[in-house]
Amino acid sequence: MPLPYESATSGDRAVTDMQKILRAFGCDKFGHMLDFSAGELLVQFEYRGRQVTVKASANGYAQAWLKEHPWSNRMQRTRTQHEAKAKEIGAIAVYSILRDWIKGQVTAVETGILSFEGAFLGQIMLPNGRTVLEAAEDSKLLPKLEQK
């Protein structure tokens, strides 16, 4: 069974869509950046004075893709080439995943299912430059998830 978003072809279109969604929602600022060394996509925007930073791991997607498509010595590429392909796919897929997540959160706010804070609480930036989620994790406010 294919992994969702593995056939995505362009991050550029997803970024344009995110910008349109957030602009229509009333956001004043929008930016994005891909951190190649960390394998993360960073999207930032501002809504009514609230700064939001959303990070998504392309490496995490690549690992999921490798689980779904494990390397075999029957393949016409090396393990290293196969892992590089996984990172390329992840780098594109993460844009579409974030676009759809942001669209879902914005829709939930617009329809009254969630407040803005309820939808984006973990990603809201504090005055010290950290997100609410980072502060909660550092202070051990949240209990650790149970292992499977």
Image (spheres, helix red, strand yellow):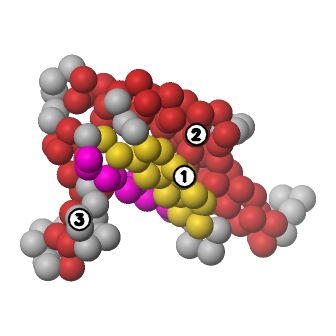
| Contact? badges 2 and 1 (CB < 8 Å) | yes
- 96 falls in the magenta region: no
Question: Tag 2: residue type?
Answer: Val
Q: Of residues 31 and 10, which is closer to you in this image?
A: 31
Instruction: Look at mark 1 in the image and give the residue it sits on.
Output: 32
Mark 1 vs 3, N-terminal side:
1
Residue placed farthest to the top in the image? 111
Q: Position of residue 140 (x, y in %)?
A: 13, 78
How far is mark 2 from mark 1, CA to CA? 8 Å
Other residues around mark 2 within 10 Å, as few (<14) / some (14–19) / many (≥20) = some
Task: Name which residue lies at 20% across and 72% down.
Answer: 135
Residue 105 found in image quarter: top left
Give percent across and percent down for residue 62. 60, 59
Drawn side of residue 21 relative to residue 78, left or right: left
Q: Amino acid at mark 3?
A: Leu
User: Where is 38 relative to 46, above or below?
Assistant: below
Label 1 to label 3: alpha-carbon separation: 19 Å
Task: Locate residue 26 relative to residue 82 in the image: left or right.
Answer: left
> Which residue occupies 67% across, 40% down?
12
Give the number of marks.
Answer: 3
Is 83 placed above or below 138 here?
Answer: above
Reading the image, the residue beneath label 3 is 126
**Mark 3 secondary-structure assignment:** loop
Q: What segment is highlighted magenta in the picture?
A: 49-60
Residue 15: mark: 2
Q: Amino acid at mark 1?
A: His
